[in-house]
Amino acid sequence: MKRTSFADVSCPVARTLDLIGEWWTLLILRDVFYGVRRFDKLLSSLGISRNVLTDRLHTLVESGILEKQIYQQKPERYEYHLTESGRELLPVLVLLMNWGNRWLATDTKASVELVHEPCGQTVAPLLVCHHCNKQITTRNVRLHNLELV
Amino acid sequence: MKRTSFADVSCPVARTLDLIGEWWTLLILRDVFYGVRRFDKLLSSLGISRNVLTDRLHTLVESGILEKQIYQQKPERYEYHLTESGRELLPVLVLLMNWGNRWLATDTKASVELVHEPCGQTVAPLLVCHHCNKQITTRNVRLHNLELV
């Protein structure tokens, strides 16, 4: 990748990580992807403190990645669902899962993988460019600074 | 995505985040992708403390994501280069960049994007399955627990 200057540049990677780049936040999204949508279920699935979970869910709702849907009236109880922007983070989780399965040794526990239903095979994610269908690699992309509007 | 049980499952997403899911770690990788390879350059590019940078670089080298290459003998100075496993994290950064550009408002600064050299267009990343070339979405993948070996 070619070098560019970062002076006066607001990096979208940094902006994204500022919002979601916290361990628990991505694991909450993982669980919601998997169908764990309720506070108490998330609490036990993640082994996280009640305060931290409350705080992270609040941030995810505020930033429009999750939305609350009521499922019980008395007392009021909510489920957390992915919005469109939240669903668009799935590929990040797929890549992290694939990378972990490829490069990090598992401990004694079983691991998980994803099955791609159109072909029935274990997902083998490949990042391609929508314009030309060719793969995106470290060697064929370069940075471009957007001009100040 | 269909629900599965997580009892006795070691999630590769959690394992990966355990290693790289820390804000600074991904920003260090971003800079190395961009060609910022030396300690002092990383220090000024990231605005990070010397101790934190030393610690994160050590972790990345220990875990085989970066490797040190000497570029000056007296005093000894090293550059950090991506290994194969490090290069395979590029797609994660590409997706985070794309997501940030799509969903997070920029401030008054300019932003950056990637140009895909084979087609000359702004990278429009699409995650497809290597087996069937069809897109990977929240709606066409399901979890599969790997058996204990």
Image: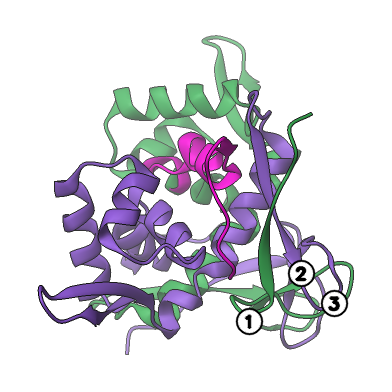
Chain colours: A green, B purple
| Marks 3 and 1 in Cβ contact (< 8 Å) | no
Horizontal side, residue B46 vs residue B2: left or right: left
Horizontal side, residue B71 vs residue A75: left or right: left
Separation of marks 3 and 1 at Cα, in angstroms: 16 Å
Give the camera-side residue of A101 and A73. Answer: A101
Separation of marks 2 and 3 at Cα, in angstroms: 11 Å
Name the residue carrying label 1.
A124
Name the residue carrying label 3.
A133
* Quadrant position of the N terminus of chain B in the picture: bottom right
Q: Is residue A61 above or below residue A94?
A: above
Quadrant hosting residue A134: bottom right
Of all chains, the one bearing label 2 is B
Separation of marks 1 and 2 at Cα, in angstroms: 22 Å
Residue B141: x, y in percent? 68, 67
Q: Is residue B30 above or below residue A29?
A: below
Name the residue carrying label 2.
B116
Q: Which residues are magenta?
A: A1-26
